[in-house]
Every structure is written in structure tokens, then in C-alpha cells.
Amino acid sequence: MDEGLGRAREWLEEHGVISAMCKIIADVYAHNAARHDPMLGDDPTTFGITTSRNVANLAVRRLSDLEGVRARLVDTALEVSCGGYVIRQNKLPGATREVSVDSISWDDSDAKLDGAIENSATGQLALDRDWELGRQAFGHVVPAMRHLRLAHAGDLETGECVIYLGFPRDNREEGLPWFDVAVVYGEPSGSDVEGCGAGRAYGTVQRTGPSYDELPLPDVDLAPRQAPGHEDAGSRAKP
């Protein structure tokens, strides 16, 4: 897991956002799978729409009690704010938890695409700031990459689900839809990825984005800085 996503996840777990959202999403999938009835006209589309709307409405209601967390509906889409991060939830296509997390598309709505565009525009800035300032560059007031997505998929037959947390990336021209993404709940069916339930130790991460610590470091010219008034003595100022 990239350090930036790890910090975001730890922050959201400390404030109860991850555990609350995982419980809401898991409960909604289980309930909607149990009440799904093709005889009444239900199909995978109604399953997906109902699930997304239920998750959004319940999150606004239940997250309001968490300190430092704001949950609201923006044009019917859920938006959760916490520590400078902005989190939205999106259902992966299909009616099975086997669907790839990379199958998600951001360009079918402005609400989904805007965060990916902003993350992509600040991605290089985030790297530059991290090299220059270290950990303090990623204060929780305005994180370098602040838009996060909870992407989830559930099995229509069993109600079991898998939930991912990641930084969306603008991939309309090429590449994957994530800078980094990890399983935070459940386990993709038929996958070796070890998921983790809310409040438990991290599982194995499914990487789909670039690893920032593997990128080449820039060449920086270093020279000693003279202390004011002591240029002749050649003393150095503390960095």
C-alpha cells in the first residue's frame, strides 16, 4: 500500500468512517440480496440502484454522530468529509463480488470524474512536496490527494460483498482508474487477496497504481549555507 493511502486509511479508521461505512454497505447488500424477487420485476439493475441509494441515505443518517465527520447528499450522491479528505461511494458493475476493481469508470458522471481529475492534477505536486518537506507535506487539513472512493461489489445470490478504498485517477486517455487501491472489507471471490473486516489488521493489498517509492529521485545540488555574519569563519548554519 502506498504511504499516502495508508495514512488516509488510518485517519479514517481513527474517526470511525471505515468501520461505519463497511457495516452499512455489508448490511445493505445482505438485506437487498435476501429481499430480491425477480417475480416482482427485480433484476441486477434494480439491485444496484437500490443498494447505492440505501448506502447513501443510511450513511448520512449514521455518520452524523461521528465527531469531525460530515456526511451529506450532493445531487443524490453521498459525500463524506473528514480531515480534509472527501470520500464518495461507488458500486462496481455487475451483481457479483468477483468483478475487478479496475472495471470502474469515472466518466459517466461529473460527480465521479471531478475527484479523479483533481487527484491527477495534483499527483505530481504531491510527489514534489513529499520529497521536499517529508511527512509534514501531508497534513490532514488539506491532504495532497484528498479525493477517495469506496468501491464495492456484492453477490446477488449470497449478499456477500467486498469493499475497496482508493485514490481515483483520471484514466480517460490511458492507464488504470486508481493511483492506489486496497481491500478494506471482505474478499473477492476466487481471489488470493486477503481482505480485512473493519477494525482488524490490514490484509494483503491489491495494487493497481504506481508505487511512488519506486519512482526515480530528482538530482538536487547541495551546498553548505553560511551563517549570517560568519562568512569569513566558514561556519555553517543549522539546516
Image (tube, helix red, strand yellow):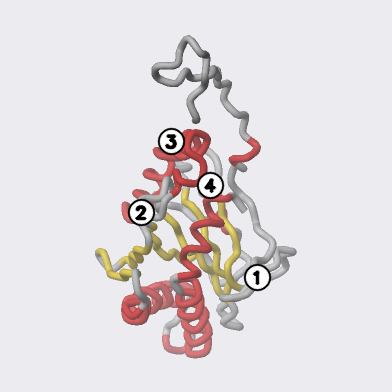
Q: Is residue 8 left or right of residue 201?
A: left
The residues tagged by marks 3 and 4 sit, at their Cα atoms, a distance apart of 14 Å
In this view of the protein, which residue sits in the foreground, 3 or 208? 3
At a point 50% along the width and 46% down the height, the residue shown is 135
Tell me whether circle 1 and circle 3 mark residues in contact (CB < 8 Å): no
Taking the view exactly as shown, the residue that stands out farthest to the left is 75
Q: Nearer the viewer, mark 2 or mark 1?
A: 2
Q: Is residue 195 above or below residue 108?
A: below
Answer with mark 2 or mark 3, whichever residue precedes in sequence. 3
Residue type highlighted by circle 1: Ala
Task: Identify residue for label 3.
Answer: 125
Which residue: 37% across, 64% down? 82
Q: Is residue 184 above or below residue 235?
A: below
208 in relation to 199, above or below: above
**Which residue is identified by label 2?**
141
Q: Position of residue 164 (x, y in %)?
A: 55, 63
Classify mark 3: helix, strand or loop. Answer: helix
Sequence-earlier tag: 4 or 1 = 4
Instruction: Return the disc, 3 or 4, that comes first in the chain's sequence.
Output: 3
In this view of the protein, which residue sits in the foreground, 217 or 46? 217
Residue type, label 2: Val
Give the number of the mark in front: 2 or 3: 2
Q: Which residue is mark 4?
A: 179
Q: Residue flagged by tag 4: what amino acid is it?
A: Phe
Q: Position of residue 214 (x, y in %)?
A: 65, 37
Label 1 and label 3: CA atoms lie apart by 31 Å
Which residue is disc 1 drawn over? Answer: 201
Numbered disc 2: secondary structure:
loop
- Is residue 118 found left or right of 32 in the rendered image? left
